[in-house]
Amino acid sequence: MVKVSVLGCGWLGLELAKALVSENYQVKGSLQDETNFNLLTANTIAPFKLQLTPNQSLPINIKEFLNSEILIVTLPFRRHFDPPMLYLNQIESLLPAIKSSPISRLLFTSSTSIYPPLSGTYTEGSEINSFTDRSQILYEVEQAFRDLPNVNTTICRLGGLYGGNRKLGNFLSSKKNLKRGYDLVNLVHRMDVVQIMIKLIKDRRNTPIVNCVSDKHPTRKELYESKAASLGVPLPTFDENDTIVKKIVSNDLLKSLFNYEFIYKDPLND
């Protein structure tokens, strides 16, 4: 049975780990504390308490956790990382342990926020001109994983995540005069991400980067007004004189390589 280690069994990682168990993988999952260990054990996921602290020694159980063929890193780039370099330091602390482990396949959940907030269509081959410290750090983290020797690494650049208890209409409910209402959104449902990553794990080809974004790109205004109305919560309002950014992250590579058909094609209708 193939062993998979999921570093970060949170909102996304737990659902992915559960799906992997159903696909007959032997799964290990990490959490920062033991509070939710029962969620892992109830789903036949071996729980590990792992806290990666920048510039400090790794947990003593890291070798056992990384004793797998496949590693999936879903550690979020949290807003409270100040300076953002702390995220890179956290990842860099992990690299020596990966190099000395049996890991031969690695997937990292990055973000489409790495592309600039400018109008245009962005593919996996688009040049990354870092426009903020966070985008620069995210790019360096991607490169650090891609530079690992003898590891087939795929960077999964995820659009804004929704699904489960993340109801789109609740995010901006009742807020007033919001900016960026006429920008296009690049979102992806959690269930699609899970299915895409399972396809990537099973695939033997070298796919360095793949965008994971649903087919349709409504404006933020029409999306959040529609969702708020369907949930019966107060509608947000948007600045009618704001600038407009028509940024589209393309999923063409994903669809052509894997013939993938999105379960949730349009966040406006899902």
Image (spheres, helix red, strand yellow):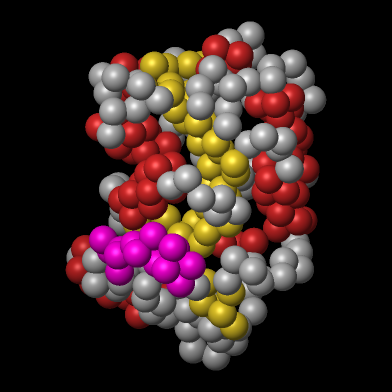
Q: Nearer the viewer, residue 41 or 211?
A: 211
Magenta stretch holds residue 59: no
Q: Nearer the viewer, residue 158 or 131?
A: 158
Residue ID at (43%, 42%): 201
Give the x, y percent position of residue 24: 28, 28
Up the image or down, 220 lies above or below 171; here it is: below
Direction from residue 93 to residue 21 in the image, left or right: left
Residue ID at (34%, 64%): 259
Image-quadrant location for residue 150: top right
Image-quadrant location for residue 171: bottom left
From where the camera sits, is residue 65 visible? yes
Q: Nearer the viewer, residue 233 or 265?
A: 265
Up the image or down, 83 lies above or below 261; here it is: above
Q: Point out the image quarter for the N terminus.
A: top left
Direction from residue 256 to residue 267 in the image, left or right: left
What range is drawn magenta here? 251-265
From where the camera sits, is residue 73 visible? no
Residue ID at (66%, 71%): 126
Give the x, y percent position of residue 269: 24, 72
Residue lying furthest top: 60
Direction from residue 59 to residue 244 in the image, left or right: left
Total label count?
A: 0
Q: Point out the image quarter for the C terminus.
A: bottom left
Give the x, y percent position of residue 112: 56, 62
Residue ID at (58%, 71%): 123
Magenta stretch holds residue 257: yes
Up the image or down, 174 lies above or below 181; here it is: above
Give the x, y percent position of residue 128: 72, 66
